Amino acid sequence: MAPMGYLTLTLLFVLFLLALLPTRRLWLAGTGLEWRIGYLVSLLALGLVAIEFEALGRYLIPLLLLLYLVPFSGLPDRWGRWRRRPPRDTIIEGRAVRLDPEEPPER
């Protein structure tokens, strides 16, 4: 593999700056640090592969565009609401029992 030139490093830096925008949107949506780091690293890795290997670029550019636009849709907010669902009742001998009696029932 050939060493990276200045143009490749400049494009990678510009890609990093562009990738910070949707990563910040994920932060505002309340996603965890691991998810944000994984998102940023995968976006940069796919971008670097698209820059270095032009033949794969025609397939990776639409994927990068999709990954870039997902945080700006309502999907992260819906995902966060889905993850914050309250726990369900525990079934003991065919009856629904709350393990925390102080918690009000949701009906």
Image: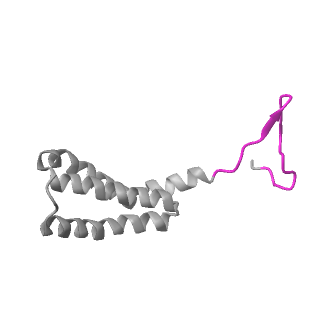
Residue 102: quadrant of the picture: bottom right
Residue lying at the far top in this picture: please name it.
94
Q: Tell whether 42 sits left or right of 12.
A: right
Residue 9, x across and y down, in percent: 19, 67
Q: How many marks?
A: 0
Predominant secondary structure in magenta?
loop
Rendered residue at 59%/51% (across/down)? 83
Q: Tell whether 75 sits left or right of 94.
A: left
Rendered residue at 24%/69% (across/down)? 13
Tell me if residue 15 is in the magenta stretch: no
Residue 39, x across and y down, in percent: 39, 57
Q: Which residues are magenta?
A: 85-105
36 up-or-down from 57: above or below: below
Rendered residue at 16%/51% (across/down)? 1
Tell me if residue 97 is in the magenta stretch: yes
Residue 65, x across and y down, in percent: 26, 54
36 up-or-down from 89: above or below: below
Q: Tell whether 18 sits left or right of 89.
A: left
Rendered residue at 19%/52% (across/down)? 50
